[in-house]
Image (cartoon, rainbow, N blue to C red):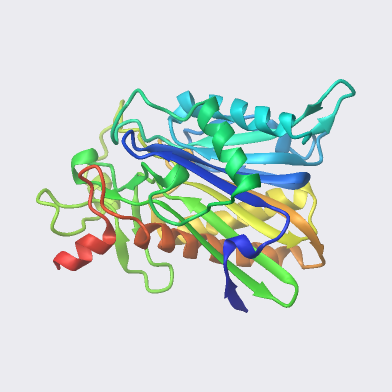
Amino acid sequence: MKEIQITDIENIKIGQVENVEAGTGCTVFICEEGMRAGLDVRGGGPASRDSQLLNPLMAAQVVHGILLSGGSAFGLGAANGVMQYLEENDIGFDVGVTKVPLVVQSDLFDLTVADTYVRPDAQMGYEAARLALEDPNYLDGNYGAGCGATVGKIGGMETCMKTGIGSYALQAGDFKIGAVVALNALGDVFDWKTGEQIAGLLNEDRSELRSTSEVMKSSLDVVENRFVGNTTLGIVITNGRFEKAQLCKIAGMAHDGYARSIRPVHTSVDGDSIYAVSVGDVAVDQDVAGILAAEVISEAINRAVYSADSAYGYISATELEGRI
């Protein structure tokens, strides 16, 4: 298999907008003709909109947009702007009097990074959708939903690290599969190939990494109000031909990528979610696609670590490694 760019997968377009000063943003994925999609949520604290559309029992067979956003539950209004832009451009489910765009959304918590009271809104969602269709601008790093992303937050924001959004994609023959991850975990991040910790909880002088799991295991006392500023969001994109139920299974297998790369993961204070979408008709075995989905998720997590720049007083992995 050879590496390709996430933007080399046809029939889906990506737009990003961020408010750098406020430390928040959003990333939207749009398929004008509609994309088959599934979702698997493993964290205990998700912030999402219209996620039930992706239940295989629901009538809708496609959605037109998937929005990953900052702002926690406050940011869920950003989808209104995506819907407005798509309706203005005649994209959506035809109901006779208009077309209703089906847009699902998941948000991460970045309210403690810079400006608590500035969140993605309808205007930001509209602009992200416009860029996706008119001037696609996807980049790894401190962009879009990754603008305010951080990891290793069990000790609070004083000892966490800056991460971002990352992507990775592969091609074998006509088959293409890739992932985008906005990395915002409570836990630590590990290189899935070497097992080495590459980001996460820092010691008090922020000179080296510590283990979140070991800190948590040091006490069995019940914590009533654990720090909740988390949630890692991912999307697997493939041109393989899969239906909703199959995509829900592929999304579930893709969570193996989270488990390989993030520890601890799927906690009660993470909203860890992965979408899987099909935008093509290439015949591929479902389980093979699931195995590859986990791999591209893990590699996208690595890219989200190493493409991030230090910001808002939080250091990146690249800066930390430069200090050692």
Q: Which quarter shows the C terminus?
A: bottom left
Could you tell me if residue 30 is visible in this image?
yes
Residue 243 picture location, percent across and down: 80, 51
Height in image: 12 above or below 89?
A: below
Q: In this orientation, which residue lies closer to the viewer: 115 or 275?
A: 115
Height in image: 162 above or below 198?
A: above
Single out the residue that lies furthest toward the front: 134
Q: In this orientation, which residue lies closer to the viewer: 106 or 56?
A: 106
Residue 17 picture location, percent across and down: 48, 41
Residue 15 picture location, percent across and down: 56, 46
Q: Is residue 251 left or right of residue 36?
A: left
Q: Is residue 111 left or right of residue 180?
A: left
Q: Which quarter shows the N terminus?
A: bottom right
Query: Which residue shows up at 35% across the image and 23% down it?
Result: 117
Could you tell me if residue 102 is visible in this image?
no
Query: Which residue shows up at 54% across the image and 49% down it?
Result: 234
Q: Is residue 140 left or right of residue 63?
A: left
- Image quadrant in which you'd find residue 280: bottom right
Residue 78 picture location, percent across and down: 54, 29
Query: Which residue shows up at 37% across the image and 44% down it?
Result: 149
Q: In this orientation, which residue lies closer to the viewer: 198 or 2?
A: 2
Height in image: 161 above or below 81?
A: below
Single out the residue that lies furthest toward the top: 97
Single out the residue that lies furthest toward the right: 96
Total numbered labels: 0
